[in-house]
Amino acid sequence: MIEVSQLRVAFGADETQTIAVDDVSFTIPEATVYGLVGESGCGKTTILRCLCGLNRQWSGTIRVNGKPVGPLRDLAFYRMAQMVFQDPYGSLHPRHTVNTILSEPLLVHGIPDIGARVSRVLAQVGLGESFRFRYPHQLSGGQRQRVAIARALILEPRILFLDEPTSALDVSVQAEVLNLIRDIQVEQGLTCVLVSHDLAVVANLCNRLAVMNQGKLVEELSVADLMSGRARSGYTQRLIAASAGYDRALVSLDSD
Amino acid sequence: MTSNSPILTVEDLRVGFPTPRGTVEAVRGISFAIGRNKVGIVGESGSGKSMTGRAILKLLPGGATSTVKSMKLGDTDLASLSESEMLGIRGKRISMILQDPKYSLNPVMRVGHQIAEAFRVHHRASRAEAEERALEMLAAVRIRDPRRVFSLYPHEVSGGMGQRIMIAMMLIPEPELIIADEPTSALDVTVRLQVLAILDDLVTTRGIGLMFISHDLNLVSSFCDEVLIMYAGRIVERCPAAELHQAKHPYTRGLLASLPRLEDGHKRLRVLERDPSWRDEPIPAEA
C-alpha cells in the first residue's frame, strides 16, 4: 500500500544542515499497521510528515497505492489518507462544536449527506449523539482523541497516519483509545502508520516496525520478534531493556 | 535523630479550591511519612498527586486553601511556619525537581551561575567558593566536563543534561527531602534511566528522602521503595514497590491491567471500570 525508497530529508543549508532522515526505505502491505519507533530527534515524525504531505522538502520516492506521489498532494489523496495528531488539546478548534469539526472535511470534499455521516461516525468511535453539539473544552482528553479519530474516519480513508495518538492520555484512557483504533483498523482493513516512542503501545497495535536512530533506519522487525526480544542491533536491545523499567544494575554512567 | 525516624510526616492534609458552587477538594485527607527512602506517589491526572507535593512546600496556586492536622519536617512544625520562615525551608531543607528543565531554568543565565546562586542563597559563601561547589556538584551528577557545562546557557544543553543540572541545583544546598514531580516524563527512555540512576545514587549515598511523583506505574515499581496510590485526592493503597504487581485495590489492579505490555502483543487491553465507592471508602492504615 505504501512504498518508501531512499527517502532523505535535510533541514537547513551548508554547514548548519541537519539530515533528519537519511536514506530510509520500507514497504507497508495493505491492511497492516506499521510502527516507527525511536527517541526524540530520530526522524520518525519527519517521515510521517513526508508521507502525509505536511513536509514538502524531501527526495527519494514515495508510492501510495501503487502510484508515486510528489511533495504536493491533491484532494483525492487526502480522501484516501488521514491523520490523527498527538495532542487532542491542540488539534481541535476550541471554538468549533464537535458537529462543525466533523462536518468540515465533508464540506471540503463536497460529500453530501453530512448529518447522517456525522451520526454514524460518532457512534463508530463510541460517542453518542449527546456529544454532537459540545465544544472541545467540554470533553475529557480521551473523548477529544475520539473526536480526532472520528474526524479522520469520516472521509472513509484507507490509510491512517497516527502520530503518538495516546501519549497525552492517562493509562486507563490510553487502553480505551488503543482498543478503539485496533477495532476500527480490523473492521475496515485500514493501513496504518503509527509513530510512537512507547514500545508497548507499538507491540499492541503493529504488525511490523522500524527502529530509527539519528535519521537512519536501524532495523525492521516483526512484532513477534519484538515480543520475544529477538532484536539484532544493540540499539534496539537497549531500547527494549530501557522500556522494561528501572534497574540500577543495567545503567552505566560512564558516558555523558 | 536515628536513621529510621521519618524525615517528613504528614497527617490529614487537605487542599481545596473555592468555587461559586462550593469548595472542590483536590486532596482529601491524606497521611503519610517519608524516611530515608524513595516513596513513589502514583495516580492519574487530577488525582491530587502534584497538589500534595506543592502543599508540603506551601506553593499552592492562588486561591487554593490547605489545612493539615500536622506536618513535620524532622522537629520543625511546617504547618505553623509563616511565609518568611518557609523561605528558609524551601530549597534549603526541602527542594523540588520539576518535569521539564526547559521551563524551570532561567534562560538568560549561565547554568553554573544558577547552581552557585542556589548555594549562596542558603549558605554564607564567597562567589568563588560557591562556583567551586557548583563545579563539584556538576561532577557529582556525572557531567564529564563540568567547566564547559558551567558556562553554557540552558538552550545549549539537551533535555537529559538539563535535568541533571536541575538535580545539581536542588542538591547543592544539601536538603533533607527532595520532591520530584514527574522528573523524567519529558525525557527519552534511555536518558531517563541515566537521570534516575544519578538521582538514585545521590539520594542513597547522602541519606536524602525522596518523594517521587509519577503517573508511570512500571517506573515507580522498579525505582521506588514504597508506593502510595492516589485516587480522587486520597491514598487508596500503599505497598512496598516490589509488591505493586500483587496490589489488592481494584483501582490499582485496573490500572495495571490497562497498561500495554511488550510481551502481550496484540492482546486486547482491559478497560478500567471506575467504582464510585472508591471515592469515599475507608483509607488503609499506614503500614
Image (cartoon, coloured by chain):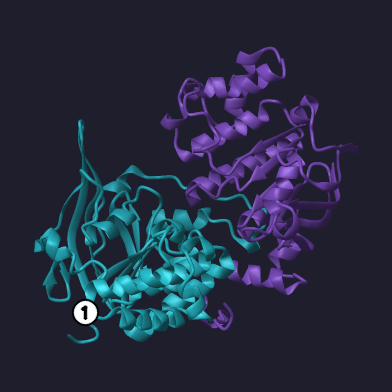
Instruction: Indicate the position of residue B179 as horizontal and vertical percent values.
Output: 32, 66
Q: Is residue B118 left or right of residue B223?
A: left
Label 1: chain letter: B
In the rendered image, the vertical position of residue B158 relative to residue B282, given as above or below: below
- Residue B207: give x, y in percent of width and height: 31, 83
Colour chosen for chain B: cyan
Q: For residue B110, which quarter of the picture?
A: bottom left
Q: Is residue B164 left or right of residue B260?
A: left
Q: Residue at x 57, y 63 (%)?
A: B188
Q: The chain drawn purple is chain what?
A: A
Residue type for callout 1: Arg
Question: Is A133 located above or below residue B146 in the figure?
Answer: above
Which x, y percent locates residue B146?
48, 80
Q: Secondary structure at mark 1?
A: loop
On the image, the x and y values in percent for residue B206 come to 33, 84
Q: How dense is the environment of label 1, judged by Cα within 10 Å: few (below 14), some, or many (20 and up)?
A: few
Q: Residue at x 70, y 71 (%)?
A: A235
Residue under label 1: B124
Where is the C terminus of chain A found, in terms of image quarters? Answer: bottom right
Q: Quadrant of residue A100?
A: top right
* Extreme-top residue of the structure: A112
The residue at 61%/34% (across/down) is: A149
User: Total of numbered circles in the picture?
Assistant: 1
Q: In the drawing, does residue B17 fall left or right of residue A133?
A: left
Up the image or down, A54 lies above or below A224; here it is above
**Observer able to see residue A14:** yes
